[in-house]
Amino acid sequence: MQPHGPLIYNLFPLLAGPFEDWRPHLIHARELGFDWLFFNPVSYPGFSGSLYAVKDHYGFHPVVAPEGPEAGVKAFAAVLEAMRDMGLKPMMDLVINHTSVDCPLTQTHPDWYARDAEGGIVNPGAMDHGEWVSWGDLATVDNAGTPDRDALWDYWDCLVAHHQGLGVKGFRCDAAYQVPAELWRHLIGRARARDAEVVFFAESLGCPIEDVVRLAEAGFAYTFNSVKWWDYEEDWCLDQYTATAPLVTGTIAFPESHDTPRLAAELAGDLGAVLARYAFAAFFSTGLMMPMGFEFGARRSVNVVRTRPEDWEAPDDLREPITEVNALKAAHPVFNQEGPMTRLPDPAAGVTALEKHARDGAGAALLFVTRDPKSGPPPRPEGPWAGAREITPTCLAERRAGLRVFVAD
C-alpha cells in the first residue's frame, strides 16, 4: 500500500496539561489511526498568557511544566520520545512573525522589530467587521527589513535546530505568508540538511494564491485549506483547490481547529452531521487534522489563554467512527492525493456531486453530499457511476448522514 497523507492529531497543551499527563492522549491518538501529533506552542508566554505570545522560546508554559524549567526540559524530551516510540511524528507550532511585546528580545535586539514613525514597536492585528483590531500583547518581528538580518535569521535557525535535536519531525508554521519566502527557504534548507525527512506545513488560510506559490517555492510540502467553511455550493473552494493542488505535495483539511467554534456546538449536537463533515474533510484532500476533544463531541471551544485541563469534556464517544473514517482514508490512494476534482451536475435537489481522481491515476471516487445536513442521505448515482462500489462509512450510513462515497479502483 502506498503511504497515506498526514493524519494529524492536534493536542492542545492547555487542555492536555503537564507533559507528564500527555501519554494517555498519545496512546489514544495512535489508536484512532493518527500518525502525526501536532501541539500548539508550549513556550513561556508573555503577560497575556497566550500560547501565541511567546516571551521565552526555550522556556515552558507553566501549565505544561508546573515544576519549573529544569523539570520541563526533561519532561518535554521524554514526551517527544514517547511520541516517536508510539509511531507518532512530533509536529510543533513555529511562530516567527511576532513575539510577546514583553519578550526580552525587544530590549536585547531592538532592531529585530518593526517600528512606527515614533520608534515604538508595531503591534500586529487584523480587520474585524471592517475595523482594525490591534493585538497589544504582540510585537511584530521585522524579518524582512531588519538591519541585523543574519543574526535574527540565525536565531530562528537555532530554534528549529534545537527542536530537531529533540526529535521534532514537522513544523506547522503560523501565519507563514506573513514571513518572507527567502527566510523560509533559508530555514527549510538548513533543517533538511540536518534531517532530510523533516516536513514543513504552512498555515496559509485566507492568503491569495500568489502567497501559496511563494510558500511552495520556498519548500513547504503542505498548506492548510479552507474546506471547513465551504457550503458545498459556492465556486471558491474548488477554485482554490484547483489552483493550489499542483503547487504542493498536498493540503490539510480539518473539521474544526483551535481558532474555530466546536463543530458539535455549531451543528447543535447532530452527530451524523458532525461525522459527515469530518469524513468529507478526510476524503477531500491529502491530509487531515483533528483537534483533541472532537472525538468526544466536545462543545466548548478551546482558548489560547484561559483553557485548562479541567475544561475537558466528553459528552459523546465518536472514537469508533473516527477510527473507521481514518482507516478508510488511508486505504484508498485517491483520498491521499491532491488529484483532479470536478463538480458534476447535482444528482438531486440540494445534493453536490464531486468526482475526484488520484493524481497518479490509481482510482477515482465520487462524493455525494447534501447541502442541508437535515435532508438525510443522498441517492445512489446513475449514469457512468451507477455500478460503482459504495464505501460509505458505516457510521454515516447508520446515522443516515448526508454523505455517500463511491469508488472506481
Image (cartoon, rainbow, N blue to C red):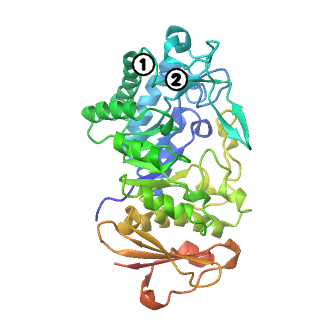
Horizontal arrangement in the rendering, residue 260 relative to residue 200 (left or right): right
Task: Please name the amino acid that badge 2 sits on.
Answer: Val
Is 271 or 199 nearer to us in this picture?
199
Q: Which mark is residue 152?
A: 1
As measured in the structure, the alpha-carbon distance from the residue carrying label 1 to the one carrying label 2 is 9 Å
Point out the image quarter for the C terminus: bottom left
Q: Mark 2 — residue?
A: 141
For the question of whether residue 320 can be seen, the reply is: no
Residue 260: where, in percent of width, then height?
65, 49
Q: Can you give x and y, in whole percent of width and height, for residue 187 in the image?
A: 35, 31
Q: Where residue 221 is drawn, which disc sits there?
A: none
- At 50% from the left and 51% from the top, the residue drawn is 28
Q: Looking at the image, do the residues carrying marks 1 and 2 touch, with CB atoms under 8 Å apart? A: yes
In the image, 330 versus 348, the foreground residue is: 348
For image coordinates 28% across by 65% down, the residue present is 1
Q: Is residue 127 above or below residue 4?
A: above
Q: Residues within 10 Å of mark 2 (few under 14, many from 20)?
A: many
Residue furthest front as drawn: 117
Residue 307 in the image, given as x and y percentages of width and height: 68, 37
